[in-house]
Amino acid sequence: QVQLVESGGGLVQAGGSLRLTCAYSGRTFSNYAMGWFRQAPGKEREFVAAIRWSGGRTYYADSVKGRFTITRDSTKNTVYLQMNSLKPEDTAVYYCNAVEPLNKRPIYDDWGQGTQVTVTS
């Protein structure tokens, strides 16, 4: 069973910043990249960013490139998402999961509770 706990969301004005944290456990994640997804009201969950454990290569959705940065701390089983220059369209619930970065799909069916990010204009 996978345990994924996201935190760090909040309410912020456009142009502001937030740092999200994902703590994970329960399965082997080191064979996969770790990533962030988000789901806005009325929309499907979408890929945001991913980072490989080996080598640290990163992947980003076009909509967040240059604004978001994903990092990881394998000693703490934690992944972070630094979000800068936030826009109202970034408003969503953010989730983490293991991910296959080549197709941007989550590996596990289990999801955490997510963390709400709300950006006001």
Image (cartoon, grey):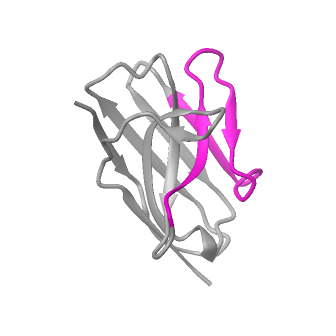
Quadrant location of residue 8? bottom left
In percent of width and height, residue 11 lies at 46, 73
Pick out the residue farthest to the bottom. 121
In percent of width and height, residue 36 lies at 51, 46
Instruction: Answer with left or right where residue 95 lies relative to residue 1.
Output: right
Viewer-side residue, 15 vs 45: 45
In percent of width and height, residue 41 lies at 45, 75
Quadrant location of residue 2? top left
Residue, x 59% and y 24% (percent of image)? 52
Q: How many marks?
A: 0
Q: Is residue 45 above or below residue 13?
A: above
Magenta stretch: includes residue 56 = yes
Pick out the residue farthest to the left. 1
Where does the N terminus fall, quadrant-wise?
top left
Instruction: Answer with left or right where residue 93 lies relative to residue 15.
Output: left
Residue, x 54% and y 41% (percent of image)? 105
Residue, x 62% and y 33% (percent of image)? 101
Q: Is residue 115 above or below residue 31?
A: below
Quadrant location of residue 53? top right
Magenta stretch: includes residue 60 = yes
Residue, x 47% and y 50% (percent of image)? 20
Where does the C terminus fall, quadrant-wise?
bottom right
Viewer-side residue, 44 vs 34: 44
Range of the magenta residues? 44-72
